[in-house]
Image (spheres, helix red, strand yellow):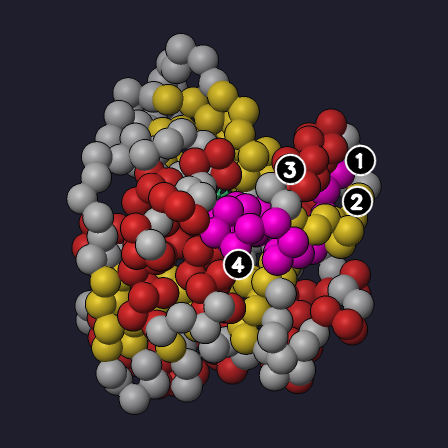
Amino acid sequence: MILVFGSLNIDLVAQVPVIPGPGRTVLAPSYQTHFGGKGANQAVAAARIAGPGHVRMAGRVGRDGFGDSAIENLRENGIDTALVIRADEPTGCAFITVDQAGENAITVASGANLAASAGDLPAELFRSDTVLMLQMEVPFAQALEVARRTNSASGTVIWNLAPVPEKMTRETVTELLAETDYLLVNEHEAIDAAAAIGLALSDFESAAADLAKAGDLTCIVTAGAQGALAVAADGSRLRAPAPRITPMDTTGAGDSFAGAFATVIHEKVPLQIALQVGCDAAAQKCLKPGAQAGMPLRAAISSLA
Ligand code: RIB
């Protein structure tokens, strides 16, 4: 089973000519409403590859219409939502601007996501075949507890260190590394995490190697058009190229990678293929607007043919 403990958001997305800097206002002709949240995005990405009945989502939404539709959308994607629980706070909402090159800027109003609780998860979820996916949009202490319970049952923990917290302490990164089997980061997140635990700063590849060694784990770096890199604790490396595409919306590309990667790790495919599947899924997502709406189905992933 693939278990996601994380955020559910509604994304309000405006296409803008240029993403505004501080003190600036830009006009967009309209906006679109999409299903988002890194946790829910990764759950949908996994379910589109794994098929119905393999993914369970745990998290919190508000007692509002956004919460109703976020849950309904996960169900339509074949995801078990019994552990998506209502909170008193409003459903999380992300305000996203996307520019003409498909790049984005995101502000998340966390709302109900901050009420996500490890206590919501029953013991039977934690088994040796559980692949747990975590991100950084619900309280860290709760995510850490879920990771510890997964490890106690000899399950597999995939932790996407995104978004990097404003204040990421040495303690946070050390605790996270200790509970993680596969650390998923982009180039900037790799360098930020390495800096937080006092490692010498250089390029993202060295940072990934240092993180892998420090945590005795495999560090996967997603590097956009440069593809993905996996570095094991012993320093050995694998690479996968990114398909050449012209992106229209990169929102959720990292989540698409993460969900597809988790699914094939659950299926025990070799790491080299899992890396390529992740790159293919991320590229496919970038061809469509919206986070979850753009997640590819298994048939669209050429490395799984
Ligand atoms: O990774 C993309 C996601 O980040 C968006 O869907 C938004 O909700 C934020 O959580």
The residue at label 1 has a CB less than 8 Å from ligand 1: no
The residue beneath circle 4 is 135
Q: Give the range drawn in magenta.
A: 38-62
Question: As shown in the figure, which amino acid type bears the numbered disc 3?
Answer: Glu
Residue 130 magenta? no
Q: In this view, does 294 lie above or below 184?
A: above
Amino acid at the residue labelled 1:
Arg
Q: Are marks 2 and 1 in contact (CB under 8 Å)?
A: yes
Q: Position of residue 174 (x, y in %)?
A: 49, 79
Q: On the rendered image, what quadrant is the C terminus found in?
A: bottom left
47 magenta-colored = yes
Q: Earlier in the sequence, mark 3 or mark 4?
A: 3
Confirm if mark 4 falls within 8 A of ligand 1. no
Element type where label 1 sits in the image: loop
- Would you say residue 166 is visible in this rendering? no
Mark 3–mark 4 CB contact (< 8 Å):
no
Which dot, 2 or 3, sits closer to the camera?
3
Disc on res. 87: 2
Q: Where is residue 62 in the image (x, y as percent from the top left)?
A: 75, 38
Q: Earlier in the sequence, mark 2 or mark 1?
A: 1
> Disc 3 to disc 4, how far (Cα)?
23 Å
Find the distance from the CA under tag 2 to the CA under tag 3: 22 Å
The amino acid beneath tag 2 is Ala
Depth check: give the residue in front, 11 or 297. Answer: 297
The answer for how far apart the CA atoms under marks 2 and 1 are is 7 Å
Quarter-wise, where is residue 268 in the image?
bottom left
Identify which residue, 24 or 43, lies in the foreground.
43
Residue pointed to by mark 3: 76
- C-alpha gap between disc 1 and disc 3: 20 Å
Which class describes the residues within 10 Å of circle 2: few (<14), some (14-19), or many (20+)?
Answer: many
Q: Earlier in the sequence, mark 2 or mark 3?
A: 3
Disc number at residue 63?
1
